[in-house]
Image (spheres, rainbow, N blue to C red):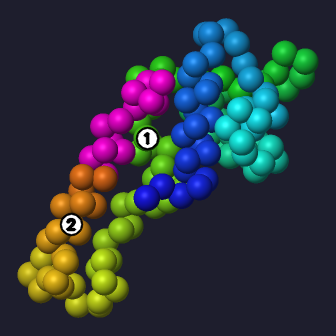
Amino acid sequence: MLSKTSTLVINAMVELAKLPKDQREGAGSLAKKIKAPQNYLSKLLQSLAARGFLSSQRGLYGGFQLKKNPKNIKLYEIVEPIDNVTLWSGCALGLKKCSDSKPCAVHHRWKVIKEAYLDFLRDTTIADLI
């Protein structure tokens, strides 16, 4: 259910969370560890830095590191800007007139799955994945 981009970002965050507190890791070595395209991952990491999840430093001892405690980084915070999971408000069957009051054949079952998935993202932290 996660996009490839969200999966890459989560895996990169997990690898950064495993680093000793004062250590940084470059996009190149992170890309090798998680088998991601280096340029693409670098742009994703810069985006996370701009959103306050990572700090970045250029130069010989540069790289990325978590700016927040991994226990305080929910998957939802990372995945939502990429996958827009809260916009999953449409009908699972693509019907235009599907709602709680006029449900399609799978509306109530899909609603339970969607809410469980969102709860998983809201309750799971990067620390939980280490």
Rendered location of residue 58, percent (x, y): 85, 26
Q: Is residue 45 visible?
A: yes
Dot 1, how many residues are within 10 Å of its Cα: few (below 14), some (14-19), or many (20+)?
Answer: many
Q: What residue is shown at x 40% (from left), y 32% (from top)?
A: 125
When the figure is inspected, residue 54 is found, relative to residue 1, above or below; the finding is above
Res 12 → quadrant: top right
Rendered location of residue 4, percent (x, y): 59, 55
Give the distance between the C-alpha atoms of the residues marked 1 and 2, in whole angstroms: 20 Å
* Residue that lies at the very extreme toward the left in this rendered image: 101
Q: Is residue 34 left or right of residue 102?
A: right
Which quarter of the rendering shows the N terminus?
A: bottom left
Dot 2, how many residues are within 10 Å of its Cα: few (below 14), some (14-19), or many (20+)?
Answer: some
Q: What residue is shown at x 36% (from left), y 45% (from top)?
A: 121
Residue 121 counted in the magenta span: yes
Dot 2: element: helix
Name the mark on residue 111.
2
Read off the residue under disc 1: 75
Rendered location of residue 35, percent (x, y): 72, 42
Res 59 → quadrant: top right
Rendered location of residue 80, percent (x, y): 46, 53
User: Which region of the structure is painted magenta?
Assistant: 118-130
- Sequence-first disc among 1 and 2: 1
